[in-house]
Image: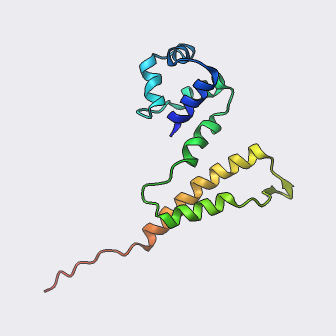
Amino acid sequence: MIGKLLTELRNKRGLTQDQIADALEVKRPRYNSWENDIAKPDIQMLKKIAAFHNVTPDYLLSFETNNISPSWATPKDRRDFKKMLEDDGDLMFDGVPIDKEDRKRVMDVLTGLFWEAKHMNKRKNKPSSTYDTKK
């Protein structure tokens, strides 16, 4: 969840919620709702938050996607996903190794694709319920 990251970034800079809210031109309760995962900032605000903390919006979003898994994921699904992420083989594009930042972006996309494929596979293999209407 993004709230934990926002809190960490704020604390690293030694700022209060009021100070960050002022810098982002929002009221403190709104900012507080983001830190407490009650609400999420829209994309424009996400860009503003990223610029304020000198990080990318991708960084803010990847923190969220890398720390949660879908509610339907089984323990085996989570192990499969962890194994995929821990594969430290060189990631290349067109024969050229991808640097650390680009690898992170690729892994973020793969994260989304992995969970989408798992979900689609589970729905496809789910037995359809048939009702015997003749008795």
**What residue appears at the point 63 percent right and 51 percent down from the top-left corner?**
109
**What residue appears at the point 43 percent right and 67 percent down from the top-left corner?**
123
Front residue of 76/60: it is 76
Q: Position of residue 120 (x, y in %)?
A: 48, 64
Residue at the farthest bottom position: 135
Number of marks: 0
**What residue appears at the point 63 percent right and 55 percent down from the top-left corner?**
110
Q: Position of residue 79 (x, y in %)?
A: 56, 64
Above or below: residue 77 compared with residue 22: below
Q: Position of residue 32 (x, y in %)?
A: 45, 24
Residue at the farthest right position: 96
Q: Does residue 117 appear left or right of residue 38 in this picture? A: right
**What residue appears at the point 46 percent right and 60 percent down from the top-left corner?**
73
Q: Position of residue 47 (x, y in %)?
A: 61, 28
Res. 38 image quadrant: top left
> Is the image coloured rainbow, by chain, by secondary structure, or in one colour?
rainbow
Res. 28 image quadrant: top left
Above or below: residue 135 compared with residue 23: below
Q: Does residue 44 appear left or right of residue 129 in this picture? A: right
Front residue of 36/107: it is 36
Front residue of 105/130: it is 105
Residue at the farthest left position: 135
Q: Quadrant of the C terminus?
A: bottom left
Front residue of 99/17: it is 17
